[in-house]
Image (cartoon, rainbow, N blue to C red):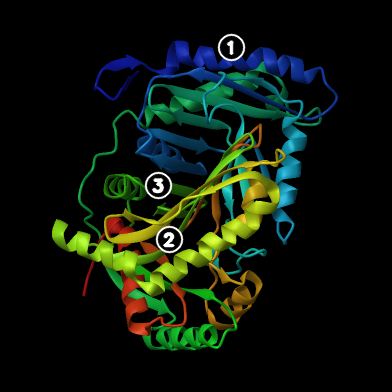
Amino acid sequence: MTVTDRSGTATDGPTGPLAGDIAAALEPLIDRATTRRRRTLVSATVPVAWCDPVALFGAARALDEEAAIWLQQETGFGLVAIGSAWTVEATGFDRFRRVASTWSEIVVDALVRAPAGVSGTGPLLLGGFGFGAESARSLTWSGFEAARLDLPSLLLTVTAGSTWLTASVVVDPDGGAADVTAAGSRQIAQRWGALVAGATQPVPLVPASAELRIAGQVPEAREWQATVARFAGAVGRGRLDKVVLARRVDLQADGPIDVPAAIRRLEAAAPESTIFAVGRGTRTFLGATPELLVRSEGREFHTVAMAGSIRRGADAEEDERLARELLASEKDREEQAIVVEMLRETLTPVTDRLEIARRPSVVRLRHIQHLATEVRGRLRDPAGIVGLVERLHPTPAVGGAPRELALELIAEGEPLERGWYAGPLGWLDRRGDGEFVVAIRSGVVEGGTVSLFAGCGIVADSDPEREWEESLIKLRALATALGSLRP
């Protein structure tokens, strides 16, 4: 069997020597683990020929595997996580700490073979946290708990210059023979071969052909705009500085949505965004988010304050005019300042260096422009990325400020469950480093049924009609990748 690389050159596939490489890397580690009298995480990473991450994700889902994909085209970095060797789930306000502590316990004495200095290789967790502390009850979010992160059985890591496969297994003295013998490593290698056999051709970039019709909106336009006016009044009376109101649009396609093709279109349309998809059962949560929550490496971290929006122009001249309008907008600058101040107040107590850009810049996406302020710093003590995620979520860009009062108002006035929409989604490695984004510009696909989500920041001078139009622009980013909307 052959796999085609980026240049179209045929290279050796994993059914022969590569399968042997995976088994050979895992077997001695599994043998060592079986001599222990405790559960042990075993993980081995080997170089592999490049294959299309989107095609591999599609092949896994076609085989009814749970899988996730993470793509950042600007840096050439990508992850495809397949299956689960180990899962951590948690609910409640302490879910972040429970995830971090449980992961630390299992990796502390793991047996690992991985290349030094290659981000995203070796054993890692990939998944997300819901917007709220408890799991959503609606069927839309079935399988997407308040916190669920998985250690992939198989992980493809693509960087700008190399491609790697990490295979992981948790050896349990009380587990079955497949988990604790060398036969388990050969089964993993064979599984990888079957997946790549289904991903020999890259997923092409083709226009969306599905026809979509609106099946429902929660809430309807009039109710949503009335809530915007009420929230703006609450801000104007000084109850709070800002609150974010979300809404959901349900769409029905004329046939099943081709999720891998939609991912490819998102990748082409939003190269500056993080493209993600998490497949659980028959549902896939996917999107293209421009919003970094936090990235960490040791004690160094990077985050971005993003708030304030305006549409793109029809040409370069109009685009520049709208960007200047956004930078001059008192309402949008106020939204941006609230997020920046929250980051300053939240991060200052735990840092010995905090660098905040003096003024925001304009980030241009395909359908919309945002104000963004870069923030970098150094932690006083190593805390791991999950500790930073807990401290930052939800930012005023998706919740509001003051945080607790805004969340109370959202719970009272928002007639939908956000689930993983606007929650932290990302990955962390065995050292506790990694990257999380805010899962906006997103939705859930199941067959031909789609639920899209969008939110708008409400301040004192928010205009309900303008906020409605802004939400439509945000919804368009994902909708156009899925199909064409019928009037």
Amino acid of disc 2: Gly
Q: Nearer the viewer, mark 3 or mark 1?
A: 3
Q: Nearer the viewer, residue 302 or 466?
A: 302
Q: In x, y percent, where is residue 404?
A: 66, 72
Residue at left offset 65%, top offset 37%: 432
Q: Is residue 448 above or below residue 127?
A: below
Is tag 3's residue or tag 1's residue first in the polypeptide sequence?
Answer: 1
Residue identified by numbered label 1: 24
The residue carrying mark 3 is 275
Numbered disc in front, either 1 or 2: 2
Instruction: Kindly report the distance in space between the C-alpha atoms of the residues bearing marks 1 and 2.
Output: 41 Å
Q: Secondary structure at mark 1?
A: helix
Tell which of 424 and 138 is nearer to you: 424
- Dot 3 and dot 1 residues touching (CB under 8 Å): no
Q: Position of residue 187 (x, y in %)?
A: 57, 23
> Which residue is labeled 2 in the image?
443
Q: Quadrant of the C terminus?
A: bottom left
Spatial separation of the CA atoms under disc 3 and disc 1: 33 Å
**Quadrant (top left, top right, bottom left, bottom right) of the N terminus:** top left
